[in-house]
């Protein structure tokens, strides 16, 4: 499938994955030492929910629009960030690089990669004045191999591709395995869309086969799977922070009552423990 961010900004998959991104970043800010974030498929950083692309799909209506002005304890920091980029009613939605940038401290770093020329220039223009942020026009998968481990020795790799390539899953798995070999203590977070089960199962099988430690699989499906439409999405995290599994259950329970047709499902499952298979 093709998942260009501009067409899906603020939908239910964005609410889910960006809430998890915020949790991971909050975890990293709990220690004084600087941290590093690599965003492999950054997009443009900020999305106009009244743009032609967003209006074409109208997906915000089953996502951020339903929870923008209500309090949800499990994802309140995420919602606060959405509110911060809107001077009143909901109009703009921050992508992953903007969410990360907002949570950086003065000594932290973000490298955001984007291959699409127009998106790269938009991203470069938006962040050129922020010295903590570097924008690179390169493959995010290649960047993992080139840029880890970072000098900070702690941080996050956020892998959120548009699934435009036929071999996207294989590229994700290869990049993850290379990255984990070079940076065994880094947090790696991989997102995937759900229509059927093949993508998530393939990544999960690879993670178990490689025995990447503390690997957690979270799926949130606000709609029933029919094999055709976007039912939900999943996240697989390696080197999962403490208590993320408990929080993820609270998140999914909270948002499942607000999003979709209320016939959906969610799951939080360990793939591997700290020392190997769970």
Image (cartoon, rainbow, N blue to C red):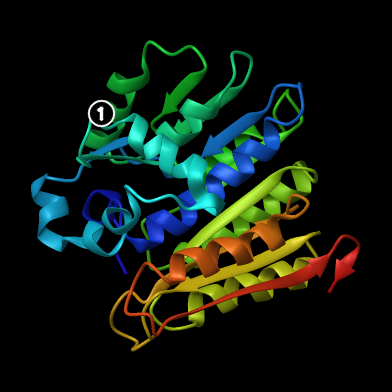
Specify whether 31 is left or right of 249. Answer: right
Q: Say what secondary structure mark 1 lies in.
A: helix
Q: How crowded is mark 1: few (under 14 residues within 10 Å), some or many (20 or more)?
A: some
Residue 248 position within the rendered picture, expressed as x and y whole percent measured from the top left: 62, 61
Residue 257 position within the rendered picture, expressed as x and y whole percent measured from the top left: 42, 71
Residue 240 position within the rendered picture, expressed as x and y whole percent measured from the top left: 73, 54
Classify 208 as above or below 191: below
Q: Residue at x 40, y 75 (%)?
A: 222
Q: Image quadrant for the C terminus?
A: bottom right
173 or 265: nearer the viewer: 265
Toward which corner of the image does residue 208 lie, by quadrant?
bottom right
Specify whether 266 is left or right of 60. Answer: right
Specify whether 133 is left or right of 149. Answer: left
205 or 15: nearer the viewer: 15
Q: Image quadrant for the N terminus?
A: bottom left
Q: Mark 1 points at which residue?
A: 122
Q: Residue at x 70, y 62 (%)?
A: 245
The answer, for residue 145, to whether it is visible in the render is no
The answer, for residue 5, to whether it is visible in the render is yes
260 or 229: nearer the viewer: 260
Residue 120 position within the rendered picture, expressed as x and y whole percent measured from the top left: 31, 32
Specify whether 117 is left or right of 132. Answer: left
Count of numbered tags: 1
101 or 177: nearer the viewer: 101
Which residue lies most toward the bottom here? Answer: 226
Q: Residue at x 58, y 33 (%)?
A: 37
Toward which corner of the image does residue 33 lie, by quadrant?
top right
Q: Residue at x 74, y 72 (%)?
A: 271
Classify 243 as above or below 155: below
Which residue lies most toward the front here? Answer: 71
């Amino acid at each position: 499938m093709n998942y260009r961010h501009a067409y899906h900004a603020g939908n239910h998959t964005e609410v889910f994955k960006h809430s998890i991104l915020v949790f991971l970043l909050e975890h990293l800010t709990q220690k004084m030492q600087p941290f590093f974030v690599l965003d492999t498929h950054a997009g443009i950083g900020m999305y106009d929910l009244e743009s032609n692309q967003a209006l074409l799909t109208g997906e915000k209506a089953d996502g951020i629009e339903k929870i923008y002005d209500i309090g949800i304890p499990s994802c309140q920091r995420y919602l606060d960030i959405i509110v911060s980029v809107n001077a009143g009613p909901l109009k703009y939605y921050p992508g992953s690089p903007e969410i990360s940038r907002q949570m950086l401290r003065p000594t932290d770093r973000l490298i955001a990669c984007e291959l699409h020329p127009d998106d790269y220039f938009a991203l470069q223009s938006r962040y050129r004045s922020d010295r903590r942020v570097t924008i690179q026009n390169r493959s995010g998968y290649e960047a993992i191999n080139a840029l880890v481990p970072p000098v900070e020795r702690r941080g996050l790799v956020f892998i959120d591709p548009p699934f435009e390539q036929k071999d996207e899953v294989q590229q994700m798995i290869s990049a993850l395995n290379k990255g984990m070999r070079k940076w065994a203590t880094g947090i790696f977070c991989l997102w995937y869309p759900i229509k059927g089960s093949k993508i998530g199962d393939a990544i999960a099988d690879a993670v178990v086969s490689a025995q990447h430690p503390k690997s957690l699989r979270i799926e949130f499906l606000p709609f029933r799977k029919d094999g055709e439409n976007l039912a939900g999405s999943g996240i697989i995290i390696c080197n999962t922070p403490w208590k993320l599994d408990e929080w993820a259950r609270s998140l999914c329970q909270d948002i499942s009552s607000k999003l979709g047709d209320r016939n959906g499902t969610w799951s939080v499952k360990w793939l591997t423990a700290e020392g190997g298979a769970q």
